Amino acid sequence: MTRVIVLPHPELCPDGAVIEAREGESLCQNLLENGIAIEHACEMSCACTTCHVVVREGFAALAPSDEVEDDLLDKAWGLEPNSRLSCQTIVSGTPLMIEIPRYSINMTKEGKH
């Protein structure tokens, strides 16, 4: 198990959270399994940006993103150099600190599909 610190988010976890994440599983899946209802409009198929997170600590230890993820991240709200899609970020043994951006772009939810 790997420790993941989730910084406070006004809606998803107002007080922040510390979870024990399963290695080899996506960060998105781990968040959901621990009661943090991060959006994942494409059902974790790397086809949207709703599960975008900013990795504040531990970014360098993650496997690099691929071209598909990078192309999608270019469309994410609040993109930063250490942004990742949580559905494509596989938890390893390195502890992480993440921030879930306040907003996400969800065309389906917004009626623009």
Image: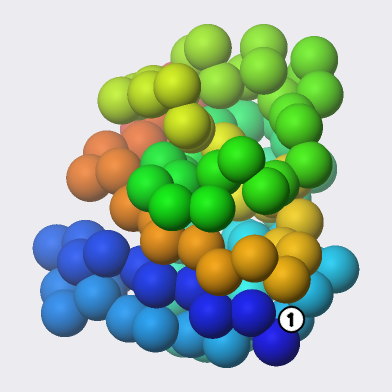
Q: Quadrant of residue 93?
A: bottom right
The residue at the point 14 percent across, 63 percent down is: 10
Counting other residues with Cα less than 10 Å from the Cα at mark 1, is it few (<14), some (14-19), or many (20 or more)?
A: some
> On screen, 47 above or below 90?
above
Is residue 19 shown to the viewer in this render?
yes
The residue at the point 62 percent across, 31 percent down is: 48
Taking depth in this image into account, of 43 and 36 the one nearest to the observer is 36
The disc labelled 1 sits on which kind of residue? Arg
x%, y% of residue 15? 16, 79
Taking depth in this image into account, of 37 and 7 the one nearest to the observer is 7
Q: Quadrant of the N terminus?
A: bottom right
Is residue 41 shown to the viewer in this render?
no
Q: Answer with left or right where residue 85 lies relative to residue 108.
A: right
x%, y% of residue 27? 64, 62
The residue at the point 78 percent across, 74 percent down is: 23
Q: Quadrant of the C terminus?
A: top right
